Amino acid sequence: MTERFTTLGSDYPEEPERTPFSLLLSTKKFWVKSVMKIIKAKEGEVFDIELEESLLAKNRQLAEENRRVLDENGILAIDVMGSVGSGKTTLISHIVKRLKRKYRIACLAGDLTTTIDAENLKKAGAKVVQINTGKECHLDANLIRKALKELPLKNLDLIFIENVGNLICPAEFPLGSHKRVVVVSFSEGPFIIRKHPYIFLNADLVVINKKDLAQRMNVSFSQLQKEILTLKPKIKVLPTIAKRGIGVSEVIEGLGL
Ligand SMILES: Nc1nc2c(ncn2[C@@H]2O[C@H](COP(=O)(O)OP(=O)(O)OP(=O)(O)O)[C@@H](O)[C@H]2O)c(=O)[nH]1
Ligand SMILES: [Mg+2]
């Protein structure tokens, strides 16, 4: 039987591999920590802006390469971003179960250290590559490039990438996917969109999950939808109860699958 489950970065918590890209990332972390000092020094400030820009530019370049590899192999890739615990894995699992006879599906499961989501996605019927980011709060195009090398690309039609649960960092790091979905949930309260607007700007579809908790949380779908549409008019916003598979067909349709 072929190996269906691979872990990238499984050596964590030991020191992760020091690629030029990860070195750049750790430099970025240094920048974040030392931003107060650098603002005082004009020269350093300019240096930092250049560093940040080159990091994002390198990521964009790798994302374009990933897209080329995906296109060459006729694969559609969907980046599923969203808050911690909003229901990303639950939703992807339901989609995989419904579509696995129509498409050959793989999932890249982004997580800091565990393989919990990867195990669930594998159970749903997808080939899975686990990507452990260690301390990083988002996936990046370099990690996706490495993960794609672990998959039999010629034998796949569809890849779901579950990003690390976070509404801030993933927005800045395109991965080369064709579509980006954001999953938030009613349990996060009424201000979740207003507080985290940027992630919605690059999204193609927004799922508001855990509708079963809407009343208890005193959150209205139409209010959240209105706020998302203000940020990005015409974007599709769909309510789901992923745990029970409710609204999953609409998400599949919304993704054109
Ligand atoms: N009430 C309710 N709970 C849900 C729903 N969908 C998922 N959950 C639960 O929410 C919890 C988190 O779900 P996951 O699918 O693991 O969420 P996630 O976004 O993948 O979480 P991270 O990967 O840790 O960020 C689990 O206990 C799910 O059973 C839903 O529609 N309603
Ligand atoms: Mg998950």
Image (cartoon, rainbow, N blue to C red):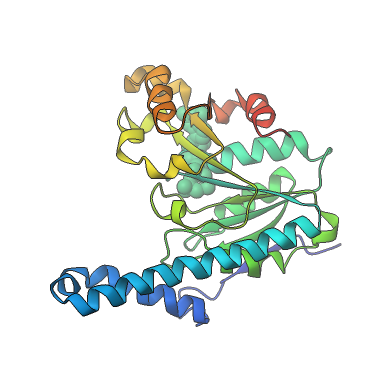
- Between 190 and 235, the one lying in front of the other is 235
Residue 179 in the image: above or below residue 170 = above
User: Residue 153: horizontal and vertical position, in percent?
Assistant: 79, 60
Residue 143 appears anywhere in the view:
no
Left or right of 165, for residue 10? right
- Residue at the image point whose x is 84% and y is 63% from the top: 2
- Between 199 and 57, the one lying in front of the other is 57
- Residue at the image point whose x is 64% and y is 29% from the top: 254
Residue 95 in the image: above or below residue 51 = above
Given the current orientation, which residue lies at the most extreme left position?
40
- Between 63 and 90, the one lying in front of the other is 63
User: Residue 24: horizontal and vertical position, in percent?
Assistant: 43, 77
Residue 41 in the image: above or below residue 121 = below
Residue 145 appears anywhere in the view:
yes
Q: Quadrant of the N terminus?
A: bottom right
Q: Quadrant of residue 62?
A: bottom right
- Residue at the image point whose x is 50% and y is 44% from the top: 202
- Residue at the image point whose x is 85% and y is 59% from the top: 154
- Between 243 and 195, the one lying in front of the other is 195
User: Residue 242: horizontal and vertical position, in percent?
Assistant: 57, 30
User: Residue 102: horizontal and vertical position, in percent?
Assistant: 83, 38
**Exactly how many numbered labels are in the figure?**
0
Q: Quadrant of the C terminus?
A: top right
Q: Quadrant of residue 33?
A: bottom left
